[in-house]
Image (cartoon, rainbow, N blue to C red):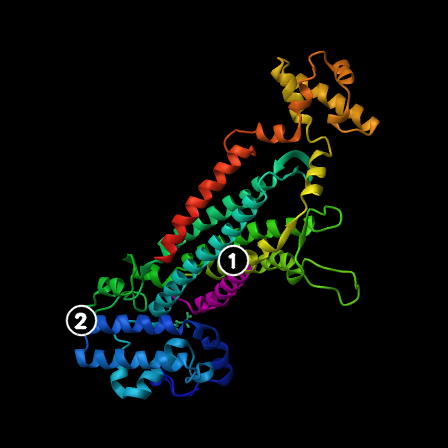
Amino acid sequence: MTEKLWQGRFEQPTNKQVEEYTASIHFDSRLYRYDIEGSIAHCRMLGECNIISHEDASLIVETLGQILREIERGQVDLSSSQEDIHMAIEQRLIQKIGEVGGKLHTARSRNDQICLDMRMYLRDVILQCRALVLEVQKALVHVAEQNMGVIMPGFTHLQHAQPVLLSHHMMAYYEMFLRDDERLQGCYKRTNVLPLGSAALAGTTFPIDMEYTARYLKFDGVVSNSMDAVSDRDYLIEFNATAAILMMHVSRMAEELILWSTKEFAFIEISDAFCTGSSIMPQKKNPDVPELMRGKTARVYGNLMALLTLTKALPLAYNRDLQEDKEPVFDTVDTVMSTLRLLARLLPEIRFHRGQMEEMAKEGFTLATDLADYLVRKGIPFRKAHHIVGQIVHHCIGEGKELDQIHLEVLKSFHKAFDADVFPFIQMNAVVDRRTSLGGTASSRVKEAMAKARADMERREAYLKS
Ligand code: ARG
């Protein structure tokens, strides 16, 4: 490493192993753009407030722009030059313009600088995540629309429960992702405040204008307490928690895709391009993509635990422990983004086996509730109707028949209220379409849900593009 910018009070050079152990440049270099943009804003503010001269401010701002371009062209080796990204950029600035460069760090500390970088980074990440969530939702709604009318067995306890529309099942995930998007919005709001000016922990004696810097960097506001600003990482934890919930939703869908592609279910087939083979079993076509989505969820949960544990019982204000917040966050960001991107591409690659789904929708006495409801409509109390249908199911098991296969005479022997109108009543489409309660699986409700989703997605898309 080159001469350190904080070397003044030290007699000995830093131990090599300590240098390696404390360095963060190999991961925080990913923040270079935010670090430079933040420094430009800070420097302009210093000039505006006459804390440094306008000429110095202009020179520093211009040089920071050059450094940004150098880095972007790969002309600066960030990997080993300095302890962290802040030092690397400041060092380069001083190399280029000499002592004047040393004025940039007036009225700030790396403690507030790193918070600024992370908040700026996270704002971008959140918007990108929101766009990807939207892509996944579009793919889901498309599947729902394309397969409108397909009936499948709905499950509870992974046992056949009642018939539902495949579209209703898909739209359930749409709703989950909608709440994930809301959580991302909430997180954005709390992230979008300027911490710069909090300096090391107590604020600064210089007459800075934090509101100027906030406006310049498009923050909605300024932090209220400098010690809070440099010590808390709740916005990062909140993002990771949001990501963990999002991945939990993804993992549930992934699990279903894996189950549904088994020979036992045979509800779907995922295209060859999105599956992989086995090195030993020539016949294999494996759903590795959803399996890894399910698997990568673990890493996002782990990162959340790491962040919570990192900050647990940590005294105020800044502690070097906090440097450890970055890798879990970056790993979560990379995992969530690549997963969502691939999920949006995977969904259109699924072929649904309508025949099999509809065949299975009838099996396992999925019409039993409706048979009981039939009796209820004829005035029999539900509890009694439930008992009678239980006996009919028992009878059917003995006969090896489904409920819609038994004769009216047999039904009548269980209760005299049964009549010929029972058969249209328990016909599969009728069973589904009668479930018109709010959020139910009736075609009419599902169509409403899809239309609402379309309108909502358009609104969000317009916002995210603006
Ligand atoms: N690399 C540090 C971090 O990520 C930046 C702040 C360092 N501050 C300090 N006083 N050493 O937290």
Which secondary structure type mostly characterizes the magenta part of the structure? helix
Q: Which of 54 and 465 is in front in this view?
A: 465
Which of the two discs, 1 and 2, labels the residue nearer the N terminus? Answer: 2
Up-down: is 178 above or below 99?
A: above
* Amino acid of disc 1: Leu
Which residue is disc 2 drawn over?
Answer: 48
The residue at the point 58 percent across, 54 percent down is 348
The image quadrant where one finds ligand 1 is: bottom left
Tags 1 and 2 in contact by the CB under 8 Å rule?
no
Which residue is disc 1 drawn over?
Answer: 304
Callout 2: 10 Å neighbours few (<14), some, many (20+)? some
User: Is 140 on the left-hand or right-hand side of 398?
Assistant: left
* Amino acid of disc 2: Glu
Q: Position of residue 44 (x, y in %)?
A: 23, 72
The magenta segment: 318-341
The residue at the point 21 percent across, 81 percent down is 56
Q: Position of residue 155 (x, y in %)?
A: 66, 38
Up-down: is 269 above or below 404?
A: below
Q: Where is residue 410 in the image (x, y as percent from the top left)?
A: 78, 17
Quadrant (top left, top right, bottom left, bottom right) of the N terminus: bottom left
